């Protein structure tokens, strides 16, 4: 049986997006913005990542100074078939490839103060308020701006709160591989994190804070395992309900749908590296930033 037309179209779009995402990874290695060793590490840590689907030969070809003839000889020496993907390497092949990349691939010097932190939590917990406070009071941290297909709420500013785009533009960005992550939230609107600004900021040594939903946090962890995940909690369930109803931006039906989702989201908190209770916005924001600094200090100690 032939698949329905809608399935074929979806598969075609996914394939195009994957090819473009792989091309972006190879370009970053070629331009010395991303180390080949880190690409291998990401591929081996997550079989669902774009890096995992990259062929070993394509990774080697992206290294400056290596042409087709030399790459073929290297592959033969490493005993890796030309069609082999990074996720399909055996233990000994992984070791041989890692040793080669450590010696031959150019080292990408990343500023030690650069860190990616993901802030997520249930609906109405105050993620936007906490991240907004960090934006205003901690200029050394870049707050990533997400794109969404939902309508702006009162007081929200396009390009500051979110990039408010229509479904057609969102589809285009998905197909072009321009999102680090994206998801459908509350079975309604789509949200996504543009990849480019984040990669540029991290390469320049700027710490980045992503304020996204839990589905997106899982995707980011799969794509960038080095990211630190922070779960924002309400003081109590009753307080979460009060905040959601009190903001008055949703219908009764929407409120009920969001509360149902929140119960499920709260169960995911153990998947995160840290938990912060949002009793007070200023205190919660300070704790998130402090966690970023603790993570940096830990990394620095491990390198000494």
Image: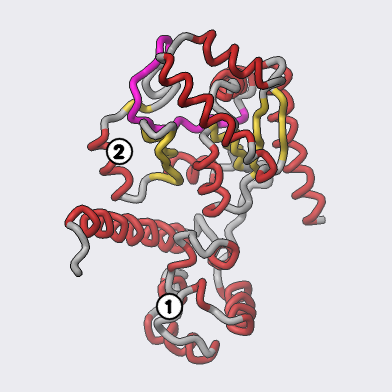
| Residues at marks 1 and 2 touching, judged by CB atoms closer than 8 Å | no
* 10 Å crowding of disc 1: few (<14), some (14-19), many (20+): many
Q: Position of residue 76 (x, y in %)?
A: 48, 91
Q: State whether residue 199 is above or below residue 22.
A: above
As measured in the structure, the alpha-carbon distance from the residue carrying label 1 to the one carrying label 2 is 32 Å
Give the quadrant of residue 222: bottom right
Secondary structure that dominates the magenta span = loop
Does the magenta portion include 197?
Answer: no
Q: Position of residue 276 (x, y in %)?
A: 71, 29
- Count of all numbered marks drawn on residues in the image: 2
Which residue is the site of mark 2? 170
Q: Position of residue 269 (x, y in %)?
A: 66, 38
- Side of 103 relative to 252 (left or right): right
Q: Residue at x 64, y 38 (%)?
A: 267
Q: Residue at x 55, y 87 (%)?
A: 78
**Secondary structure type for disc 2:** helix
Which residue is the site of mark 1? 57
The residue stretch that appears in magenta: 140-155
Does the magenta portion include 150?
Answer: yes
Of the pair 202 and 213, the residue shown nearer to us: 213
Give the quadrant of residue 159: top left
- Residue 269 disc label: none
In the picture, which quadrant includes the N terminus? Answer: bottom left
Q: Position of residue 74 (x, y in %)?
A: 49, 86
In the picture, which quadrant includes the C terminus? Answer: bottom right
């Amino acid at each position: 049986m032939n698949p329905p037309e809608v399935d074929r179209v979806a598969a075609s779009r996914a394939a195009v997006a994957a090819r473009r995402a792989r091309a972006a990874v190879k370009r970053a290695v070629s331009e010395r913005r991303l180390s080949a060793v880190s690409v291998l590490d990401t591929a081996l840590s997550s079989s669902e990542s774009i890096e995992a689907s990259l062929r070993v030969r394509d990774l080697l070809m992206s290294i400056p100074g290596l042409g087709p003839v030399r790459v073929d000889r290297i592959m033969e020496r490493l005993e890796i078939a030309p069609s082999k993907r990074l996720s399909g390497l055996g233990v000994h092949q992984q070791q041989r490839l890692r040793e080669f990349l450590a010696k031959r691939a150019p080292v990408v010097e990343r500023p030690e103060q650069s860190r990616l932190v993901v802030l997520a939590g249930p609906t109405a917990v105050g993620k936007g308020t906490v991240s907004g406070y960090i934006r205003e009071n901690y200029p050394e941290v870049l707050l990533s701006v997400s794109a969404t297909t939902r309508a702006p709420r009162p007081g929200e500013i396009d390009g500051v709160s979110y990039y408010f785009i229509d479904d057609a533009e969102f589809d285009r960005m998905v197909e072009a591989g321009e999102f680090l992550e994206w998801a459908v939230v509350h079975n309604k609107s789509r949200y996504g994190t543009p990849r480019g600004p984040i990669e540029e900021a991290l390469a320049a040594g700027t710490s980045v804070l992503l304020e996204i939903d839990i589905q997106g946090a899982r995707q980011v962890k799969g794509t960038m395992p080095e990211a630190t995940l922070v779960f924002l909690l309400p003081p109590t369930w009753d307080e979460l309900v009060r905040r959601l109803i009190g903001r008055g931006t949703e219908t009764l039906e929407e409120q009920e749908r969001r509360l149902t989702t929140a119960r499920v989201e709260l169960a995911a908190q153990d998947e995160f590296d840290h938990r912060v209770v949002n009793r007070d916005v200023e205190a919660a924001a300070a704790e998130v930033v402090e966690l970023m600094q603790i993570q940096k200090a830990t990394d620095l100690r491990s390198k000494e």
